[in-house]
Image: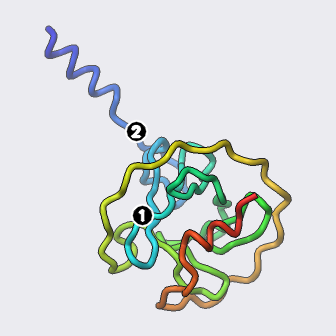
Amino acid sequence: MLGFMLAFGLLLLQPFRTGSSSQLNTIPRAEDITLYDANGEATAYIATGEEQTIYLWEGKPVAYLVPTDSAFSIYGFNGTHLGWFERGIVRDHDGDAVGFVKGAVRVLTSLEPLKSLRELKPLRALRELAPLKPVYSRQFSRVPLSVFLAAGAD
């Protein structure tokens, strides 16, 4: 009987998948999506259960995702359009890759360190208009992912 109750309890704890049509629909809603920098270091993450908020690994909320026709626009809490998140790659206004999710590019990723506690999210400022998407390049930006995302901090 105890074995049955334990198995039933574990079944209830399994994450479920949603039927959303967004690019994040294959990820359970309460799971974080790690963003790696050009060197494969875990630098930030998308909190899918918190309106697609992007946190630096230290717990500072710096940006959030807004769905568009073919990708997500990345906006800072200060209202600045930072770039795009498409096919698992974070792109800047020049079309260069700034970060990525594991498996999106051929870069070896390191083990994820423990995350710090999340800070409170600031209020979102009015968003500026997004520029036209550039032609995407096959190279990484010279700007580190942490600096790129920190430009959106309040």
The quarter of the image holding the N terminus is: top left
Q: Secondary structure at mark 1?
A: strand
Against 61, residue 107 (above or below) is below
Residue 78 image offset from top left, x and y in percent: 78, 61
Residue 49 image offset from top left, x and y in percent: 55, 43
Query: Looking at numbered disc 2 in the image, what kind of residue is underneath it?
Result: Phe
Q: Residue at horizontal 50%, vertical 56%?
A: 57
The mark lying in front, picked from 1 and 2, is 1
- Using the image as rendered, state which of residue 104 and residue 141 is in the foreground: 141
Q: Secondary structure at mark 2?
A: loop
Q: Which mark is residue 16?
A: 2
Residue 96: image quadrant is: bottom right
- Using the image as rendered, state which of residue 49 and residue 152 is in the foreground: 152
Against 72, residue 139 (above or below) is below
Q: Residue at horizontal 51%, vertical 60%?
A: 44
Residue 6: image quadrant is: top left
At label 2, counting other C-alpha atoms closer than 10 Å, the crowd grade (few under 14, some 14-19, many 20 or more) is few
Q: Residue at horizontal 62%, vertical 44%?
A: 119
First in sequence, mark 1 or 2: give its number. 2
**Whole-Å distance between the Cαs marked 1 and 2?**
25 Å
Query: Looking at numbered disc 1 in the image, what kind of residue is underneath it?
Result: Ala
Against 88, residue 77 (above or below) is above
Give the labeled residue for mark 1. Answer: 42
Residue 95: image quadrant is: bottom right
Q: Residue furthest top?
A: 1
Q: How many marks?
A: 2
- Using the image as rendered, state which of residue 52 and residue 18 is in the foreground: 52
